[in-house]
Image (cartoon, grey):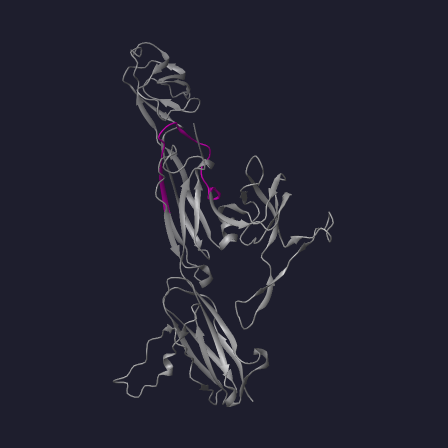
Amino acid sequence: MKEIKEIIINQAAIDASVQSREYIIKGDPGAVFSITITNEDNHYYNFPENTIIQNSDTETRPAPAFSATTTRLKPVTLDSSGVYSNGVSFPAVTDDDKYIFTIYPEMHYDTKLSDSMGKGSYIFAQIEQLINTSITFSHLSATEDDGDGRYGTYATSYIVKGADTRTGDVSSKTLSISWALSLSESAMEIIKQPDQNDFYFETSKTTATTGSGKNLELTDISGLSVGMEVLGTGIAAGAAKSTITAINRGYYNAGKSTTAFPVYDIAKIVDSTDPNNPILVDHPGGTLELAASNSTFVADRVLTFKGYGPVASKIFNNTNFSVSNFKITLDEVSTTINDTDANGTSSLSVFDLTSVNGIKDDVSTVTGVGISDATTTTVTNISSNTITVSTAFVPENGQTLKFGKASRTGTLTGDVTISSFGSNNIGLVFELDKIITIE
């Protein structure tokens, strides 16, 4: 019998725009075959080349398309070269799609597949078409709810989209972030300057078993990494969170394990992605070791996992980013002296202000006419609108003073470069509590 011996096609994923892909069939001259191509909706490619044009002035081939109508490439006979090539045009899509290429040797034309391909039909390619994914950059405080906390409503998020890196697109994108921060009361103080590890994302996983201690079994450990926080009922009682210190594929087998050599069994499950060729693959479940040992677990409980920075996000879904010129600045507080004792001749260290909003005792510095630059003058006490400063000076009623290092308003700015977009959308949240304290 004549054989189909080799099929060549690039199976790399394609992006969401109109795309094309060539395929090459090699075999014995005279071998006959046909092909079907289906998408995830089980719609069939229409193979425009099936249409024979008799008169090019009045007839045209249909545009490439997928439809519910069952269609296959009309039988093709390999010529004396033993090679056939053609191309497929994929439409633009608005959600992910997957195309399955199946070749059928025409048995009644004395044709079969080579032994390496198996018997009967053969799925020779599976190509994914992937829409662009997005990264949403936002900011919040874990202690201040949006809209009703002291921050009020948070500034607008930034959303940037790019090609899923599985399509082979490695182009980077950069955006500039500027978030205005404003408190309705109290004052903010900078703990530290921001960095890329102050951004976090969240994902959820389901527990596999009931137990206690620091070994947590999950139904799926994909995308998790050491250092991620774990939050939920029963986790690290008292603190309601812990961190991952180790990740083991499979589940602990006490009967096979010793203290020095723990054993984790990895079960096999059936993957039926290709219904004509189901295969056994490793179960995605596994065991986490947590920093805290006082956790309790219940099967089928959903837990939240928090990953900080680009190392965790890259492991999670291949999102990679970096930041530069990242900083927070607090606006200087400006107010006036409102005290008749400030007569321009008496030296005072205690006096009244028109407002103390944004001023923080033992933090705020003060500058103004009459205040020496030789040493730093700070606010040491606030009582109503009366302040005490560390160094006495001769103030004058109505005089303007400037206060630094604490404020009710500020701005968080920086540049973010995305070097790879992930396999799905992700939200990266800047945690304000890492860099600001409010009192």
Using the image, determine if residue 153 lies above or below residue 250.
above
Determine which quarter of the picture holds residue 220.
bottom right
Residue 313 drawn at (x, y percent): 49, 50
State the residue in front, 39 or 70: 70
Image: 30 above or below 146 = below
Confirm whether residue 391 shows in the render: yes
Q: Is residue 386 above or below residue 146?
A: above
Q: Nearer the viewer, residue 9 or 321?
A: 9
Q: Quadrant of the N terminus?
A: bottom right
Q: Position of residue 138 (x, y in %)?
A: 40, 44
Is residue 140 shown left or right of residue 104?
left
Residue 249 on image: x %, y %: 62, 54
Q: Position of residue 290 (x, y in %)?
A: 61, 43
Relative depth, front residue between 162 and 209: 209
Figure quadrant of residue 184 = top left
Residue at (40, 59) in percent of width and height: 132
Q: For residue 137: magenta?
A: no
Q: Residue at x 38, y 55 (%)?
A: 161
Q: Can you tell which quarter of the image residue 76 is in?
A: bottom left
User: Residues in magenta?
Assistant: 176-198
Q: How many marks?
A: 0
| Quarter that holds the C terminus | top left
Residue drawn at x 49%, y 72% as measured from the top left: 125
49 and 314: which is toward the camera:
49
